[in-house]
Image (spheres, grey):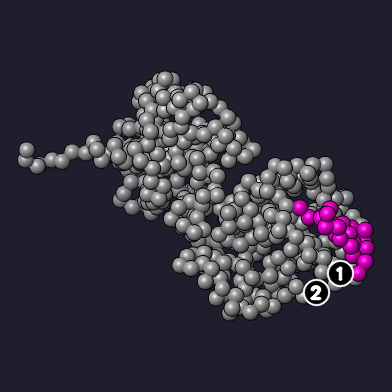
Amino acid sequence: MSKSVAPTQFQTAVLRFRTHCNILSAGGRGSGKTVALLLDVISHCLDFGEEAKPLVTREGWQGLSQIMDDLYELCVAAWGDTVTRNKHDATISLPTGGTIYFTDVSDEKSYAKHQGKSYTALYGDEVGNYSPTAYAFLKRIMSNLRCAPGRRTHCHFTANPHGKCHTVLFREFISKSPPWHVFADTAGNLWLWTTSDLSQNPHIDQVAYARNIRTACASDEKLAAAWLKGDWSVLGGVMFDAFDPATHLIKAPPYLGSVRYTIGGDWGSAAPAVALLIARLGDSLGRLRRGDYIVLDEVNTADPQDLSVGLGHPPSMFAEMIGEMLARNGLRQRQAPLVIDDARGLQSDTVVGIMRTCGLNAAKPQRKDRIGTWNLIRELLNNSKTGAEKQGIWFTNRCCYLIETLPEAPRGTLRAEDIDPKYNKDHALDALGYGLQSMQNQYVRCGRVIGVPS
């Protein structure tokens, strides 16, 4: 990295806002966003002098180590050889008396070490690649930002589109305002998000870098467009890109008329168990057509602090939760068959068997077809959004776990037609898939052929 601290035109434009609002630099790859963030750190330390205590974060330690090296070079360029760093403590000490801190943020443990500490600014690099859980922990560190009266704490994040946190950032920033326009978040904090592309970085071979990006993306044109142009409007990096809360979330209808119910369930103990009550309409209902699906309600055993972890409830307790869900929807246990993946316990008992003992009409899925299931869900979402004369799907706000995890489910890196195997919050999606596939199969089996002679 060059030791020059002279910013490019793009970086200068970003840094103009650093004194009066927080920044999300959300452009394409190779545009110089990280260097703008590092220059912001330098400026903050100059402003705050001995009071400066900025914290610089990345999700993983390896990337954090690189950014620490780059920032150290810039500090030496700004203050000279009196700058010192301690790699063990992950700090850079400045001759002004200020200290720059570094940390990785990924889980509860990495967040807990910041309890009781105070910082004057928070810098998050590549937050688009954070998992939504890691991003939530990053935001919690904002509670550690403190400074003297008359000063202003500061946040500056960078992100590329199509990362694991794409949907979360789109919802919190991109959808709130046009780029380069200041807006207030729900807490009243002022933010700005910026766009950029590699043409704004004169320090790289732009032609070669663009060629490398296209090679890395192979046939995924949406991903290439996002990385080259900083385009957040395409969601090819997530599986269910057609999901739109404004379209797909509805109030639970007070009356459904002719309807058929089923419950899709995904069992887990260490992982969450999830059950979804799904209705298929037998008659049209307002804008909803005959044959449309409504996911009415949900129960889950996910830890609220980590949606990938289950609370360890036994199957009998989960069966009680399903019974309570049916009761609050005015249904008897036999009115909604339960389709749930099976597992055998230490006493040779099975989850399906225990559910039946508890009075539920439970059965295993006929077959598991993840690819076909994701295609079905995508088609139903698209039909609802486009108004196509085909069956669609809708969700009520009771399905909190499903609504939280469905939009962020990432495509696999090497197998784009499947959800990334590293995504550990697909339990509601599996439950939804079991329920929908069961209803599809029942629909076909119950069909009649009319007019064929016997």
Q: Residue at x 75, y 60 (%)?
A: 65
- Which residues fall within the magenta stretch? 81-103
Is 101 in the magenta?
Answer: yes
Marks 1,2: beta carbons within 8 A: yes
**How many other residues sit within 10 Å of disc 1, few (<14), some (14-19) or many (≥20)?**
some
Residue bearing mark 2: 3
Question: Where is the C terminus found, in terms of image quarters?
Answer: top left
Q: Nearer the viewer, residue 376 or 26?
A: 376
Q: What residue type is labelled 1?
A: Val
Q: Residue at x 56, y 71 (%)?
A: 213
Q: Which residue is drawn at 47% across and 65% down?
A: 220
Q: Which of 335 and 105 is in front in this view?
A: 105
Residue bearing mark 1: 76
Residue 171 position in % (x across, y down): 58, 52
Calculate the distance from the C-alpha at mark 1 to the C-alpha at mark 2. 8 Å
Residue 328 position in % (x across, y down): 46, 24
Name the side, left or right, on which 153 lies relative to 384: right
Q: Residue at x 10, y 42 (%)?
A: 451
Residue 111: assigned label: none
